[in-house]
Image: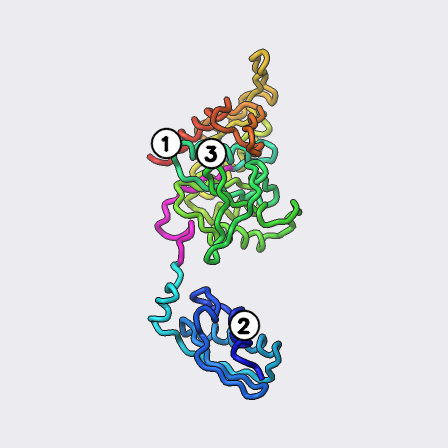
Amino acid sequence: MMDRQQVLDVLQTVQDPFLHKNLAETKALKQLSADGERVALEVALSKQDKVKQMQIQVEISSKLKEKGAKAVSVQFTVLRNEEIRQLGGFPVKLPTLLSPGVKTQFISVASGKGGVGKSTVSVNLALGMARQGKKVGLLDADIYGFSVPDMMGIEKRPAIKDERIIPVERFGIKVISMGFFVENNSPVIWRGPMLGKMLNNFFNDVYWGDLDYLLLDLPPGTGDVAMDIHFKLPHSKEIIVTTPHPTAAFVAARAGAMATHTKHEILGVIENMAYYKSKKTGEIEYVFGKGGGDKLSDLLKTDLLGRIPLTQPEPKPGILAPGVYFEGDPIAPVYDDIARKVINKTTK
C-alpha cells in the first residue's frame, strides 16, 4: 500500500505553476486515501486553471504509478488567500527591456564586414560609458562569432532566479552572450527560427534590471540576425565601425544603409585601427590607409565619433581581460571621449 510519505515525495517534484514552489512546500495535499494499489488525493493549487490542472494530473499520476500505484485519482481545489500570503504571494512579474515605459536606450554597434574590431569597440565603449556614471548592459548578439566573454575574461555563467536569466556582471557591465550557452566553443549551426527564438530570450527572459543603455554587438554584415534585431528594436540607434581602408568603408556603408532603411538613427562612425604609433620613436604609420572613416561618415551624413589606433591593451596585473583598455591605458581616454559624445547625442 502506498503511504503518505511516498505521495509527498512525488509532490516535492511537482511545481505549483503560479507560485513556482513545489506542492510539498505549498502544503497542497488536502486529502489522501489509499486502498491497496489505488490512490485518491485532493490537491490545492494557487489558481483555478483547467489546462494546468490537466498537466499536473498527468504528471502526478505517472509518477505515482512509477512508484507502484495501479490507479490514481486526482481532484483539485484552490489554496485560500491566507495560505497564498503565508507562502509569500505570487512572484512579481519583472519588466523586460521591451516592456512599455522602459527607458533603456538601445545602441547597436554594426559593421559591414568582420575583422574590423567591432566587438573590441563594443566592449570598450560600454566601459567608457560606465566610467561616465551610466548603467550599461552589453548584449553579444554576434551569435555565430561571439567573443565578448573571452575579451572581458568572463569565466562565470549566468544565474537563474525566478525563471529569469541574470546577466554576468564584469567591470560594472551586465553581459549576456551566446558564448554562455554553448559548450567548449562549439559551433552554432542554428537556422533562422531558432536564432529568432534565442534573440527573444535575450530580450524577454533576461532580467537586465535598470539600465541607461544596452549596447548590442551585432553580427557583421546585413544577415538574418542583424535584420531581426533591427525590426525587434525599432527605436535602436546605431554606430558603424570601419577601418581606414576605402574598401572596408565601402562595405560598411551597407550596414549604414540597412539602418537607414529600418529608420534607425545613426549616431556616428568609429574608425578603428586608424593608425599605428611606434612606442620607441613616436612615428605614426597608416597601416590600413587613410580616410575611410571620413568617407563613410560623409556618405552616411553623420559624425566621425573618433579614431582608435592599432594597439594591444596594456595588461592589468592579476586580471585576465585581453580585450579591455583599462583606465590608465593610453587608449582608454579615446573611448571615454567617444562615450561622452554618444551620451551627449542621446540625451538631447
**Amino acid type, callout 3:** Leu
Is there a contact, CB below 8 Å, between mark 2 and mark 3?
no
Residue 227: image location, x then y, percent: 53, 46
Colour setup of the view? rainbow
Front residue of 228/141: it is 141
Q: Amino acid at mark 2?
A: Asp
Mark 2 or 3, closer to the camera: 2
The part of the chain drawn in magenta is 93-109
Image height check: is 27 above or below 348?
below
Residue 270 pos. (x, y %): 50, 29
Q: Is residue 193 magenta?
A: no
Kindly state the secondary structure of the residue where label 3 is placed.
helix
| Spatial CA span between label 1 and label 2 | 59 Å
Task: Name the residue at 43% across, 40% down.
Answer: 136
Which residue is tagged 3? 127
Q: Residue furthest bottom?
A: 35
Where disc 2 sits, the SS reads helix
Residue drawn where x is 51% and y is 72% of the image: 11
* Magenta stretch: includes residue 105: yes
Q: Which residue is mark 1?
A: 344
Which tag, 3 or 1, sits closer to the chain's start? 3
Q: Is residue 33 above or below residue 344?
A: below
Disc 1, SS: helix
